[in-house]
Structures are given as structure tokens and as C-alpha cells.
Image: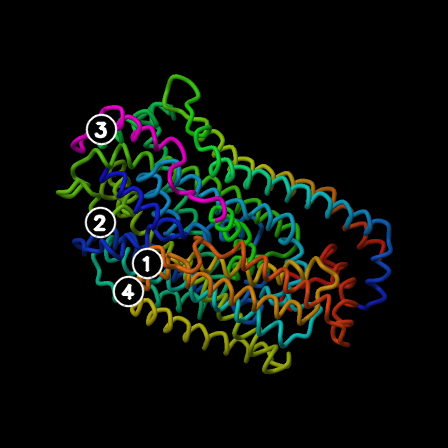
């Protein structure tokens, strides 16, 4: 790509919007994932009793739904990003490509 | 006491990924009677995949076909292939065995492998697709001086591939010895030869389809096993867990001098975290290796170049994350199923009450318990196929690092034609295949438990920081990336050597003498790598550094929009 074309795209408002939104969204979700995972690891490191505590009268502990929750959260947060990127961000990208 | 002790040992071995399988299989390897059902099913798999290779060979003409299947893989197919790369035999057999021995800790372990995927999606996946062509070095070296960055990237790739490959080959030999009753060396040679055939003739197209087929077989088999386990308990997880706790309590009570309270506590202990996470530093460091290592594994990264667009790249990680997450949920059920179906059945236990063939046979014995001999053969064949497919992907990524990064870009300065590049990658494939067989045989009796975790640590400490900084940080320079990358590479390997799993377990030094006390070096080596990249880039003010910084804008435009990105069709 020629430098001038890149400069022109870089200055276009759609590109600025795309870059700002995607980068913000990506970082927010990244931080959410880091908080959930390392929160879980630190919970295990510092408060094993909580995860081993039984929920009701049976053998089920809080650890099982929390652990499964982390797995489900991981899948859902990925889906959330891909959904928005495949619609909103791709529409913006198309606009940038057309405006070239 | 004995049970606690053995559970503890299993966990200590489990700490690095794949350890359980590797260590257990190696130590408890006694040859089994030849299993003809399994061999027959495996032969069917091989025949099918060779047919696909023949078809793929007719389509593999250019370097682009060879490295990236011509960019014509859809997001869904690629997602399955990525999941296939990730669901190795070590994770299937190792994690279900870990759940069987220690319950909840197996879940903690598998979660670590999953959480890197969203990070890879949010920050890297589509940018990789937009910037790269064949290898992750294309991305890392995009705006930098080609030679030094390519040399670094090829080193990072080959180190990761070598450790991963050794772990897979040794695992393969031992596992196949157990499952099929073949000699160790025959098993290793079969894996080596078949892998070379796939990669040499079918390139990425064959490698991807072998991976897709295997992923479907593995997911199907694991789903069936979990279904049968849950069916027995009327699809009530509580009933399954309660029965598993009862079995574990009875086993603990059978040990002399155990009070009923202690036995009940031992039984219930599988429902919560045990000894897996010892100190927070090891836990976080290990978590970082898994999380960021995923985004630095060359055989995973190269799969992003096989899809036609950034949109398909995103879809592939979405599918991959979904399948891998589902798979880990299944392994948890399979592990608990193994407690209730296998540990209670004398057919699967030896005179001392241990599992025949070692703990890693948990899933395999469960297959027999729920589906009889035919299903046992099926699962054994799938385990073999799994190793084969993972090994083929690793070899292809090693071969592309040598031919595309070193030969074509560094030695020929980008002047190599497609045909000669292709020839070099085929020669490299042959060399890597032969090397894998030789190393597999050489390491047969070594404790290779640390190798996969080392591969992840190197990927997180060398490949990931360089990729991340070159794509996202405008002030990064050639020498910042190269020096920082090599610092991460050297430190992750060095610290692993002086960590307990190598220093004490493999090299035989006394317990407690390891200079580096933690399980994984990633927290330190990855931080050091990032810091070095930052400091060197900030200090550097050469002419090259100014070119590097000036190139960021154009790189960013392409990484964000895909304008100018490599097209799907032949280049």
C-alpha cells in the first residue's frame, strides 16, 4: 500500500471511529477476561474453603458452578466480540473501503 | 494416606501440561496384547486420510496452497481444525485421568487452556489475518528489517515446535504400545512416516482435513461417553457426583486405620480444589504461560492464514473456543464417569487396585465400560489419529518457518520462486520427520513431562510479546523486538531448566535444590521480554528505528481494515 493512501485512510472519520471503538471494546473485554480468570485463580489460592463449600444438602459444591461458569463465560465473551465485529466493525470497514 | 500420597504424586506430575500422560505412560508402559479392533479402525482412518491426501495433492501446486491451503478454508472448518490442534491426546487422556484421580483440580487445569482464546480473538486474530501471509513472522516483521526479525521468529517457531514434537512423539510411542500392543519404535516410525506423507503431498489442505476429521471423531466419541455416563444417572449431575464421592469414600475407608470421618472428607475432597494450586506466584505464572502461550503457538497462528478474510478468522476462533470449551466440559464428565465405572470394576484394576496400564487409561477403560470392545477400538484409534494430526500440523509450521522465513526471505532476500520455496519446505518436512522419529526414540525413557509446558512458556515469553508489540505499539523497533524476543526465549528455557520439574525430577538433583522455585517461568520471562522490547525501542534512534516507527501508520491501517491484505486465491 502506498504511504499516501494509508495517510488518507488514516485521516478518514470512519477509520478513526473503527479504530477507537474496536480498540476500546477489545481492551474492555480483555480486562474482563483477565479479571474473571485471575480472580478465579486467586480465589483458589486464597479461599479454597469457599469453593469446597456445599451448596445444599447434596455433595454439590460452589466450585462446580463457578468453574463451569468460567468456561461458559469464556465462550460467551468470545461470541459477544465476534458478533459485534462481524456486524458493526465490518460495516465500518466496508465504508472505509468504499470511501477510498 | 497412601491414596492421598498417590493423588499428590499424580498432581505433581500433572502441573506441566501433558505431564500426566507422558510420565504415567512412560513409567507404567507394559505392552498390551495386540488389539485388532483398534488396529482395524485405525487402518480405516489412515485409508480415508490418505485418500484425502491424494485429493489434496492434486490441489497443492503453489507455495500458498502448501502453507495455507490457498486461503480457501471456511471459518467453521478452520475452527474445527484449530480445536483439533488443541485437543491433543495429552489433553484428552491426561485431563480425564486428572479428574479421575483428583476431581476438581482437573477442571482448574483445563480452564487454564481455554482462557487464552478470547485474548487471542480480541487483540490478535483479525490483525494477524490482515497482516500475514504464510507465517507469524510475516506479521512480526511487517514494518521491520526482515532478516533479524525472521531469524528470531524462525528460532522461536523451531524451539516451540521441537519441544512440542518430542512430547507428542514420546507420548505417541508409549500410548500406542499400550493401546495397540505394538512395539514402541514401530509406533514412532508409523507416526513419523504417516505425518510426512500428509505434509509432503497434501500440505496444509491435507493437514487441515486430517485435523477436522479427527476433531469430529474425538468430539463425537467424547460426547457419546459423557452421554452414557449421564444417562446412567438419569442426567442428574448431583447423582453422578454423589456416586463418585461415595466411591472415593469407600476407597479411602478401605485403607487400614482410616476413621470414617477422614474417609468421608477424602471422598468429598474431589468436589473442591486440592493441591493443584500451591502458591499464588506459581499459579499466576502458569496461568500466564497457558493464556498468552496460546497466542504464540506457531502451529495455531498459521491457521489464521488459511481463511479468506478477517471475518472468517474471527468465526474460526469463535468455533474453536466453543468446541474446546465443550470438550473440556466433556472431559470433566468422563473423569467422573471413570471414578464410578472404572475404579469400581475389577476388570480394569490390577492386583494392587491400580488402573491397568496407568491412570491415563481412564478414558480408554471407560470407553470399554460404556461401549464394549468395538467402542474401545474406536477410542484407541481416535487417540492415535489425534497424535498423528497434531504432529502433522507442528511439522508443517516448522517447515514453513525454515522455507518461508529462513530460505526465501533471509537467504534469498525474497527472490526465491514459489517452486524452489516449495522444494525447500518438502526437504525440511523430511528432515523434521526423521528428526522427530530419532528424538522420539532417543527420549523414550526420559521424563519429558515438562516439555509441553516449556513450549507454552516459550510461546508466551518470546513469540507473543514480539507479535503483540510489533502490531500494537507504534514505537517498537526492529532491534527492540529481536533483542526482547531472544531475552524471553533464553530466559524461559533457562528458568525451566533450573525449575523443580527439570532440575530435580529429570536431572535428579535433591528435592528443594532447584534455584528457581516456581512451576512456570512465564511471569518472569514474559515480563522481561516486554520490558526489554520497551527499553531497547525507546533507547534506539538509528535510521532503521525511524523507518520502523514511520511504518506503523500504514501497518495499522492494513491491520484494522484489511486493505491490501493477502487475498484468498493464489498470490
4 or 2: tag closer to the N-terminus? 2
Q: CA distance from mark 4 to mark 3?
A: 37 Å
Q: Name the residue rendered at 40%, 32% in the picture.
A: B272
Q: What residue is disc 3 on?
A: B250
Task: Report the mark closest to the observer, 2 or 3.
Answer: 3
Protein chain holding label 1 = B
How far apart are labels 3 and 1 at the CA level? Answer: 32 Å
Residue nearest the observer in this picture, B301 or B350: B350
Determine if the magenta segment contains residue B280: yes
Depth order, front residue of B330/B489:
B489
Residue under numbered circle 1: B505
Earlier-in-chain disc, 2 versus 1: 2
* Residue B351 relative to residue B448: left or right: left
Mark 3 or mark 1, which has the lower sequence index?
A: 3
Q: Which residues are magenta?
A: B253-281
Label 2: how many residues lie within 10 Å, few (<14), some (14-19) or many (20+)? many
Q: Position of residue B295 (x, y in %)?
A: 56, 55
The vertical placement of B365 against B145, above or below, is above
The reply to whether label 2 and label 1 mark residues of one chain is: yes
Q: Is residue B48 visible?
A: no
To the question of a shared chain for discs 4 and 2, the answer is yes
Report, in whole angstroms, how far the alpha carbon at label 2 lies from the one at label 1.
Answer: 22 Å
> Mark 3 or mark 2, which is nearer the start of the sequence?
3
Residue B110's tag is none
State the separation of the CA atoms marked 4 and 2.
Answer: 17 Å
Q: Quadrant of residue B363?
A: top left
What number is the disc on residue B357?
Answer: 2
Amino acid at each position: 500500500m502506498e504511504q499516501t493512501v494509508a495517510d488518507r485512510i488514516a485521516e478518514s472519520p470512519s477509520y478513526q471511529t473503527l479504530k477507537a471503538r474496536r480498540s476500546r471494546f477489545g481492551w474492555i473485554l480483555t480486562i474482563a477476561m483477565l479479571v474473571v480468570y485471575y480472580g478465579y485463580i486467586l480465589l483458589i489460592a486464597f479461599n479454597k474453603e469457599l469453593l469446597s463449600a456445599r451448596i445444599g444438602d447434596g455433595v454439590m459444591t460452589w466450585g462446580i458452578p463457578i468453574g463451569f461458569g468460567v468456561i461458559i463465560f469464556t465462550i460467551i465473551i468470545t461470541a459477544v466480540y465476534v458478533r459485534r465485529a462481524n456486524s458493526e466493525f465490518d460495516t465500518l470497514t466496508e465504508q472505509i473501503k468504499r470511501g477510498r | 494416606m497412601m491414596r492421598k500420597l498417590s493423588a499428590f504424586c499424580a498432581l505433581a506430575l500433572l502441573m506441566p501440561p501433558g505431564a500426566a500422560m507422558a510420565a504415567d505412560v512412560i513409567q507404567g508402559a507394559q505392552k498390551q496384547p495386540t488389539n485388532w479392533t483398534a488396529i482395524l479402525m485405525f487402518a480405516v482412518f489412515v485409508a480415508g486420510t490418505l485418500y484425502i491426501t491424494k485429493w489434496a495433492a492434486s490441489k497443492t501446486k503453489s507455495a500458498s496452497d502448501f502453507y495455507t491451503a490457498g486461503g480457501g478454508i471456511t471459518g467453521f472448518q478452520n475452527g474445527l481444525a484449530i480445536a483439533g490442534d488443541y485437543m491433543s491426546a495429552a489433553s484428552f487422556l491426561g485431563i480425564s485421568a486428572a479428574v479421575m484421580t483428583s476431581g476438581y483440580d482437573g477442571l482448574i487445569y483445563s480452564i487454564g487452556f481455554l482462557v487464552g482464546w478470547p485474548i487471542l480473538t480480541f487483540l490478535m486474530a483479525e490483525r494477524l489475518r490482515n497482516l500475514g501471509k504464510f507465517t507469524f513472522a510475516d506479521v512480526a516483521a511487517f514494518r521491520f528489517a526482515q532478516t533479524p526479525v525472521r531469524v528470531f521468529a524462525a528460532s522461536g517457531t523451531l524451539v516451540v515446535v521441537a519441544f512440542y514434537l518430542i512430547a507428542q512423539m514420546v507420548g505417541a510411542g508409549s500410548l500406542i504400545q499400550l493401546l495397540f500392543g505394538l512395539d514402541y519404535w514401530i509406533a514412532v516410525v508409523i507416526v513419523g512416516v504417516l505425518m510426512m506423507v500428509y505434509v509432503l503431498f497434501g500440505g496444509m489442505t491435507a493437514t487441515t482435513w486430517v485435523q477436522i476429521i479427527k476433531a469430529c471423531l474425538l468430539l463425537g466419541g467424547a460426547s457419546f461417553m459423557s452421554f452414557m455416563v449421564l444417562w446412567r444417572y438419569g442426567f442428574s449431575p448431583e447423582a453422578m457426583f454423589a456416586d463418585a464421592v461415595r466411591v472415593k469414600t469407600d476407597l479411602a475407608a478401605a485403607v487400614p486405620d482410616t476413621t470414617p470421618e477422614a474417609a468421608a472428607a477424602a471422598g468429598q475432597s474431589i468436589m473442591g480444589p486440592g493441591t493443584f494450586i500451591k502458591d499464588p506466584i506459581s499459579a499466576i505464572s502458569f496461568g500466564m504461560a497457558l493464556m498468552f502461550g496460546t497466542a504464540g503457538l506457531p502451529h495455531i497462528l498459521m491457521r489464521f492464514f488459511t481463511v479468506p478474510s478477517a471475518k472468517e478468522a474471527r468465526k474460526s476462533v469463535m468455533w474453536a473456543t466453543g468446541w474446546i470449551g465443550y470438550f473440556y466440559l466433556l472431559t470433566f464428565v468422563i473423569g467422573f464417569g471413570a471414578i464410578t465405572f472404572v475404579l469400581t470394576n475389577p476388570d480394569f484394576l490390577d492386583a494392587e487396585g491400580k488402573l491397568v496400564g496407568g491412570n491415563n487409561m481412564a478414558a480408554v477403560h471407560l470407553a470399554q465400560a460404556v461401549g464394549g470392545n468395538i467402542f474401545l477400538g474406536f477410542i484407541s484409534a481416535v487417540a492415535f489419529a489425534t497424535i498423528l494430526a497434531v504432529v502433522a500440523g507442528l511439522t508443517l509450521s516448522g517447515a514453513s518457518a525454515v522455507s518461508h522465513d529462513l530460505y526465501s526471505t533471509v537467504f534469498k532476500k525474497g527472490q526465491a520462486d514459489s517452486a524452489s520455496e516449495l522444494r525447500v519446505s518438502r526437504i525440511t518436512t523430511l528432515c523434521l520427520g526423521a528428526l522427530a522419529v530419532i528424538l522420539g526414540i532417543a527420549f523414550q525413557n526420559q521424563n519429558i513431562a515438562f516439555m509441553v509446558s516449556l513450549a507454552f512458556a516459550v510461546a508466551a515469553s518470546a513469540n507473543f510479546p514480539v507479535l503483540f508489540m510489533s502490531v500494537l505499539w507504534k514505537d517498537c523497533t526492529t532491534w527492540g523486538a529481536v533483542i526482547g524476543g531472544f531475552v524471553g526465549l533464553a530466559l524461559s528455557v533457562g528458568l525451566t531448566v533450573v525449575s523443580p520439574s527439570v532440575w530435580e525430577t529429570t536431572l535428579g538433583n535433591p528435592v528443594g535444590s532447584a534455584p528457581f522455585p516456581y512451576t512456570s517461568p512465564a511471569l518472569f520471562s514474559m515480563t522481561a521480554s516486554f520490558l526489554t522490547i520497551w527499553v531497547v525501542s525507546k533507547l534506539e534512534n538509528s535510521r532503521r528505528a525511524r523507518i520502523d516507527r514511520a511504518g506503523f501508520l500504514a501497518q495499522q491501517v492494513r491491520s484494522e481494515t484489511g486493505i491490501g491484505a493477502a487475498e484468498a486465491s493464489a498470490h
